[in-house]
């Protein structure tokens, strides 16, 4: 191994009995028992018990008394079999222990801010002392499984002929829908690089450059509010392929996902992953990233309620409902109504079929026999309705579906639901400008045959954009790209960009597309999201070695920090007074 140690702590077995070995690691615990001192010595492979007997090794025993948790030790001694009553079946090394002859303290530790085996340690504290937190089995597993999965992905990409190309972090703004992080430039005060929101245009240029298949585990920077699945900086498996159609790209992603899940010891999802159009996802689940581990589909009652005596139904353009498998109490319904209102509902109509099959509902008296028969459900079911425009109904029931899925624990925690969402609209209304903006990014191609309508009817053009969803988390997005300069310009025009602005911001792309650009498409999968789901963590901070917290700071280094005026002056920056 090395001069410091002959073996790793967690690897000793009965086969090692009789060997004289040197070990090194951290003191996990120390126990004194009538003269004997027991120390559990730990490294990343596990623990082994050291026994120090003052009669055999008086110097080592004196040293052992000084040991506190998390001291770093080196011990030399003989591996012996434990007495039968002392065997610890819960420990892989539990049949043996090391009779210490010499013991050295290599490094001491101040008293710890938290114990490594303590439950529920405040996350801010864990991150402030991340080096301690990293020694816990949880973080060791997360970071190591992360490594294994990334290695499996890299192997897959290599086998499939992808070339790993490094692209710049400091670049021009890339339109991925977030704010840019800016980097001032001392040599050109007043000018800024943007940190790449993704390598999008560089990977497209790699295709124009004839690389054929590009990939990168790319770091991306986006100035957005931090959430369970968002950090300022994150990694993605970023790829691009020339001369491909949508299904070729989906195939590669599925191969990478399957390899990575298998590498982590999970049952890989069967291929091909199910596919859903955007329209269908919105209609059936009220979301473009539905969790398909549970059914709970949105049902339509628009036709049925056209002539309803219940005016709220009859007058609404669309009436839909969810049949939740529980007879909710009044208090629970009041809470659901609050949630529905947060999603834009004016109120919440409901029908409760209680456990004896009785109907409880303030609206039942307005409904016809035909309506009541159609809404008849199993005992123990509540129908919650949304009656409004299609957009509002979709949003409200989508929000309620997600909420109910969580509240009623409808998803089987051991199930895995991967699926694709396809055929997104190319544009959506931009509330700020009143015009059109891209749904994904402005480089996505229209579905073949729809190009002619890009400028005349942008709201109805479908794009060749696809999202990958795992258990309700959007893992990533991709698209077939525009490879003709004229089409790219039409898209920019729909977004309200003048020729001048197009040249100024994207002249390099338009030039490249005008010089022999092959048809191409690609994808980016958020690695941290993928890894969090892979190891069963609720947020991506648990799979990132040094993440930021939701205020946008790093509890470990204290960044971001102010800079002295002199340093800012060099960059041509003067700060506004704080407001
Ligand atoms: N650049 C896109 C993103 O980062 C992914 C892609 O279209 O390949 O979301």
Image (tube, helix red, strand yellow):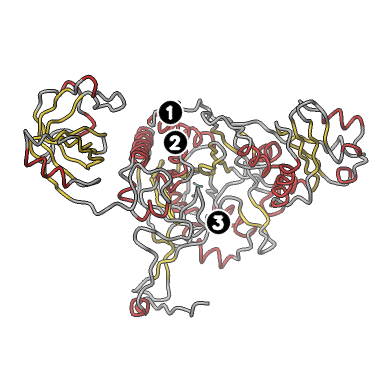
What is the C-alpha distance between the residues marked 3 and 2?
Answer: 27 Å
* Residue 120 placement (x, y as % from top left): 43, 45
Q: Classify mark 2: residues with Cα within 10 Å, few (<14), some (14-19) or many (20+).
A: many
The residue singled out by tag 2 in the image is 534
Judging depth in this view, the residue of 331 and 461 nearest the camera is 331
Count the labels in the image: 3
Q: Identify the mark nearer the N-term, 1 or 2.
A: 1
Q: In the image, which is nearer the foreground, mark 1 or mark 3?
A: 1
SS at mark 3 in the image: loop
Q: Identify the mark nearer the N-term, 3 or 2.
A: 3
The residue singled out by tag 1 in the image is 266
Q: Identify the mark nearer the N-term, 1 or 3.
A: 3
* Residue 116 placement (x, y as % from top left): 33, 44
x 25%, y 40%: residue: 29
The residue singled out by tag 3 in the image is 177
Judging depth in this view, the residue of 266 and 197 nearest the camera is 266
What is the C-alpha distance between the residues marked 1 and 3?
Answer: 34 Å
Residue pushed farthest front?
34
Q: In the image, which is nearer the foreground, mark 3 or mark 2?
A: 2
x 10%, y 44%: residue: 62
SS at mark 2 in the image: helix
Judging depth in this view, the residue of 86 and 262 nearest the camera is 86
Q: Is mark 3 within 8 Å of ligand 1?
A: no
When the figure is inspected, residue 495 is found, relative to residue 209, above or below; the finding is: below
């Amino acid at each position: 191994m090395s001069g410091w140690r002959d073996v790793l702590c967690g690897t000793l077995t009965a086969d090692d009995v009789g060997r004289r070995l040197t070990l090194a690691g951290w003191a996990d615990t120390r126990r004194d028992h009538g003269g004997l001192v027991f120390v559990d010595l730990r490294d990343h492979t596990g623990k082994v018990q050291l026994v120090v007997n003052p009669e055999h090794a008086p110097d080592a025993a004196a040293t052992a008394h000084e040991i506190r948790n998390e001291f770093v030790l080196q011990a030399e001694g003989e591996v012996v079999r434990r007495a039968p009553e002392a065997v610890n079946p819960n420990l892989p090394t539990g049949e043996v222990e090391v009779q210490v002859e010499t013991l050295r303290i290599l490094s001491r530790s101040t008293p710890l801010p938290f114990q490594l085996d303590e439950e529920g340690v405040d996350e801010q504290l864990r991150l402030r002392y991340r080096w301690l937190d990293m020694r816990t089995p949880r973080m060791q597993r997360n970071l190591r499984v992360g490594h294994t999965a990334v290695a499996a992905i890299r192997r897959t990409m290599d086998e499939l002929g992808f070339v790993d190309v490094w692209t710049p972090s400091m670049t021009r703004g890339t339109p991925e829908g977030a704010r840019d992080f800016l980097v001032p430039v001392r040599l050109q005060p007043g000018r800024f690089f943007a940190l790449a929101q993704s390598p999008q245009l560089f990977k497209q240029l790699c295709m124009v450059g004839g690389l054929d298949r590009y990939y990168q585990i790319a770091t991306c920077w986006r100035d957005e509010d931090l959430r369970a699945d968002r950090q300022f900086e994150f990694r993605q498996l970023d790829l691009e392929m020339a001369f491909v159609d949508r299904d070729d790209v989906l195939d590669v992603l599925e191969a990478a996902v399957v390899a990575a899940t298998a590498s982590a010891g999970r049952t890989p999802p069967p291929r091909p992953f199910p596919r859903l159009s955007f329209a269908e996802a919105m209609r059936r689940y009220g979301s473009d990233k539905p969790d398909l581990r549970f059914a709970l589909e949105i049902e339509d009652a628009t036709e049925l309620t056209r002539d309803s005596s219940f005016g709220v139904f009859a007058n609404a353009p669309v009436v839909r409902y969810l049949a939740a498998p529980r007879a909710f109490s009044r208090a629970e319904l009041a809470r659901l109504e609050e949630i529905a209102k947060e999603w834009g509902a004016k109120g919440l109509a409901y029908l409760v079929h209680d456990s004896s099959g009785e109907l409880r509902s303030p609206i039942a008296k307005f409904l016809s026999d035909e309506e009541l028969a159609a809404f008849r459900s199993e005992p123990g079911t509540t129908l919650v309705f949304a009656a409004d425009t299609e957009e509002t109904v979709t949003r409200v029931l989508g929000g309620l579906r997600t909420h109910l899925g969580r509240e009623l624990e409808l998803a089987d925690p051991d199930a895995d639901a991967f699926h694709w969402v396809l055929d997104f609209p190319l544009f959506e209304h931009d509330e700020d400008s009143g015009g059109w903006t891209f749904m994904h990014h402005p480089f996505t191609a229209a579905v073949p045959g729809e190009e002619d309508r890009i400028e005349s009817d942008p709201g109805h053009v479908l794009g060749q954009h696809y999202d990958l969803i795992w258990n309700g988390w959007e893992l990533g997005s991709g698209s077939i790209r525009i490879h003709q300069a004229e089409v790219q310009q039409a898209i920019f025009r729909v977004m309200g960009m003048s020729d001048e602005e197009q040249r100024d911001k994207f002249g390099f792309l338009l030039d490249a597309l005008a010089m022999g650009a092959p048809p191409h498409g690609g994808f980016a999968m958020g690695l941290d999201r993928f890894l969090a789901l892979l190891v069963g963590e609720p947020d991506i901070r648990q799979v990132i070695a040094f993440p930021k917290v939701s205020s946008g700071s790093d509890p470990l280094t204290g960044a971001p920090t102010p800079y002295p005026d002199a340093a800012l002056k060099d960059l041509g920056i003067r700060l506004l007074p704080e407001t």
